[in-house]
Amino acid sequence: MKHVQGPLCTVDVGEQTAETESIDDVLESFLGGRALGTKLAYDRVPFDADPLGAENRLFFATGPLQHSTMSFTGRMSATSVSPLTDGLLSSNAGGFLSRNFTGTGYSAVEITGASDDLVIVHVTDDGVEFEAVPELEEATVPETCEYIEDEHGLEAEHTVVIGPGGENQVRFASIMTSEERAFGRGGLGAVLGSKNVKAITFDGDSTHEVEIPPLQMEIHGEAAQSDHIMKRQGTSSMTEYANEVEALPTRYFSELSFEGAEGISGDRVEEKKYKKGTCSACAFACKLPTRDEETGLETEGPEYETVMAFGSNSGVDDIVDVMKSNKLCDEYGIDTISAGDVVAAYLASEDEFGNVELIHDLVKKIAYREGVGDTLAEGIDRAHDELGVDNWTVKGMEFPAHDGRTLNGQGLAFATSNRGADHMYAEFYPYEYPLVDADRAFDKTGLDDKPPKIIELENVNVIKDSGVLCKFSRDFVSPERLETLLDADYEDLLELGGTVVSLERHFNNQRGFDRADDRLPYEIPGFEEGLAAYYDERGWDDDGTVPAERLEATGATETPADD
């Protein structure tokens, strides 16, 4: 099996030290990216670690495919204990960071401890340096990137940065790279904020060689020649379609379709797109640099989930208003899905749907924890009682679009996901929309025969997140091609994926997670039976915990090595 190369670099920001160690035995079994980060976190983070404490650790890792020139490989992974869900969580981001990261020569970089002063950590193939930056306190993401370029000659593609949201430990703060690409879900920006790390830079010329088969060029060529609608509209192309089938959450999840969907549709986004946008080495170019000529507003996006959260779910029908919300979240460094949903919760509590001025004011208040923003910065799970609204989360994570009340298999996938209400964990929703190929389609109602497919998708997505391979490669990278690219049997790859899912689950079990957390705020037909079938297929116990024999099969121990 192909795998990432290089030692682990452990950076203690409290002691301001850095050490390297060989982890070749781990790399050979855990590929890279999310799988590697999960294994390292499982072994090195205490089960009872406070997500915002010095004992929590944050792992950045690439995979073997970052050593190719293939489309869909401009991504990397980050793993830590989430301040939002309180469970182990991985997030990945696109852009241009990953290949600059590989230049350092490390397979993974681990951040631990907590600094007394606000610092930037500079990681290179020559070592690690620490720079105190009190002048950047509560600086926005663009302001921080400008400082790094002016002072160090490193563009935003070399950086991970937090904004005021991360410094103020907003539980859904993002880590930003390339200014507008996000390690978005789960609040990993707050983890960096708790460690007083404003930014990390990566640079060097020590990339290891990992030989990727010539198939990479065939895939790259197909991506370049494709006329896929996402090249014009990104994921926003789903908006009106999801609305038509009643899978578009509206007005804080009180409705399933939005009468103003046309005003926030993919067509409206495409009208504002003024140039192509892409990630490193990718010819698919599905990103969305957008500009409103009348106001001069420029941003990247919004993508479909942001359109839902700050559009239909907030009662907003003008794409420019959604673009503004998107831009503010990127500047302040907070997740657009969670931020939009928690804003929608507040709008519901005040009967203020569609109040755009209030929405934009709330985004700023959340980032700086000002006034009611301090409450909203905790997320819906912790704030819903005070707001007097229903708790629209799973495991503390706010919902994306692709509503599970209509797409029942996606509903079950929201419940089983170790990350919480996240559509990309299993990515089941494409199989329930009627536009999917007939030989792959499932009826959207009920859960018959769906648990095994959810498990397969969860497992293969571990491999994509470990490769690291963009999820939008789904139409270009078949199981057979994945085998060729990674030099491994598909079933062996799925087994690795299942191991990682079970490691995540067992870590979370030790933090108190069980079947009671695999719950939805709505009912779907056959849910309990579907959940039981999922556990049975996974080899887990009926209470949603990982039994000793399954844990042993992963090669894990009951207790982290340093606990």
Image (cartoon, rainbow, N blue to C red):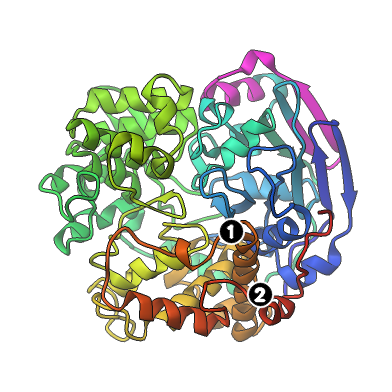
**Amino acid type for the residue under numbered disc 1:** Gly
Residue at 56% x, 52% y is: 92
Give percent across and percent down for residue 9: 82, 47
Q: Looking at the image, which is closer to me, 493 or 153?
A: 493
Spatial separation of the CA atoms under disc 1 and disc 2: 36 Å
Q: Which residue is mark 2?
A: 486
Mark positioned earlier in the residue sequence (1 or 2) = 2
Q: Residues within 10 Å of mark 1 (few under 14, many from 20)?
A: some
Q: Is residue 60 above or below residue 325?
A: below
Query: Is disc 2 placed on a helix, strand or loop?
Result: helix
Q: Is residue 24 left or right of residue 117?
A: right
Q: Which residue is mark 1?
A: 512
* Three-letter residue code for mark 2: Leu
- How far from the left and from the top, in percent, is residue 505? 59, 66
306 lies left or right of 265: right
The reply to whether residue 290 is visible in this rendering is no
Quarter that holds the N terminus? bottom right
Marks 1,2: beta carbons within 8 A: no
Residue 138 percent across, percent down from the top left:
56, 19
In magenta segment, residue 430: no
